[in-house]
Amino acid sequence: MSLSIGDHIPEIMLKDQDGVIRASTDVRGKTLVLFFYPKDDTPGCTAEVCSFRDSHAALLGFGAEVWGVSSDTNASHQRFARRHQLPFPLLSDRGSNLRRAFGVPRALGLFPGRVTYVIDAKGIIRHIFNNLLDGPAHVLEARRIVEKLQQGT
C-alpha cells in the first residue's frame, strides 16, 4: 500500500554510506527530503543526486535535511558519494523494506521507482513526486515545497 500526502511516515532506521545509522527520530523537528532512486552510477540517478548536491545548500537554508535511498550496498554508496562529492547521506535499503513501507512503485514492474517525499517536522508527508525519467525535476519539486513549508504556506 502506498503512502499518501497527509500520512505519517514509517520508522526509518538504515545505515548510510559511512555505516552511520540514520533514523527518522534524528530529523524530528526538521523537514526531510527523502528521495528513492533506482541505482548508483546510472546516468539518470547520477543526474538526480548531483542536482540534489547542487541544491543542498539552498535546501539546508530552508531548514531541510536530504537523504537518498536505494538498495545498493554501503560500499557502492560510499564510492558514489565520494565520486560526486555528495554532502548528504545515501541509505542502503538492501531488502527494499523501506521502499515497500513507503509503497514506492516499481517502474514497468521491473525497475525500482524514483520517488521523492517531502516530510514535515512532525513526520507527515506533505508532497510526493514520482517521475522515473526526469531525476533533476525531483530537486525542483522538493525546493518548491520546502520553501513553502518554511514560509508556512
Image (spheres, rainbow, N blue to C red):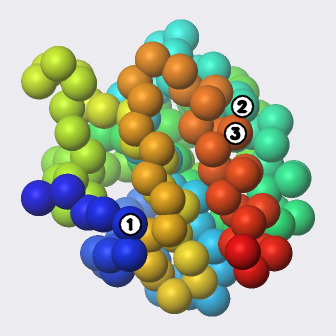
Q: Nearer the viewer, mark 2 or mark 3?
A: 3
In the picture, the disc for residue 51 is 2
Tell me the CA gap for discs 2 and 3.
Answer: 9 Å
Three-letter code for the amino acid on which mark 1 is drawn: Ile
Q: Quadrant of the N terminus?
A: bottom left
**Residue 120 screen position, x and y as percent:** 56, 76
Q: Residues within 10 Å of mark 3 (few under 14, many from 20)?
A: few
Tell me the CA gap for discs 2 and 1.
Answer: 24 Å
In the picture, the disc for residue 140 is 3
Q: Please report the residue visible at 50 percent of the width from the left and 37 percent of the height from the top.
A: 77
Three-letter code for the amino acid on which mark 2 is drawn: Ser
Viewer-side residue, 11 vs 117: 117
- Kindly tell me whether residue 140 is visible in this rendering: yes
Three-letter code for the amino acid on which mark 3 is drawn: Leu
In the structure shown, which secondary structural element does the residue marked by tag 3 occupy? helix
Q: Please report the residue visible at 69 percent of the width from the left and 39 percent of the height from the top.
A: 140
**Residue 39 screen position, x and y as percent:** 39, 26
Tell me the CA gap for discs 1 and 3.
Answer: 18 Å
Q: Residues within 10 Å of mark 2 (few under 14, many from 20)?
A: some
Q: Residue furthest top?
A: 43
In the picture, the disc for residue 5 is 1
Q: Residues within 10 Å of mark 1 (few under 14, many from 20)?
A: some
First-in-chain label (2 vs 3):
2
**Residue 25 screen position, x and y as percent:** 48, 86
First-in-chain label (2 vs 1):
1
Q: Please report the residue visible at 38 percent of the width from the left and 75 percent of the height from the top.
A: 6
Q: Residue furthest front?
A: 153
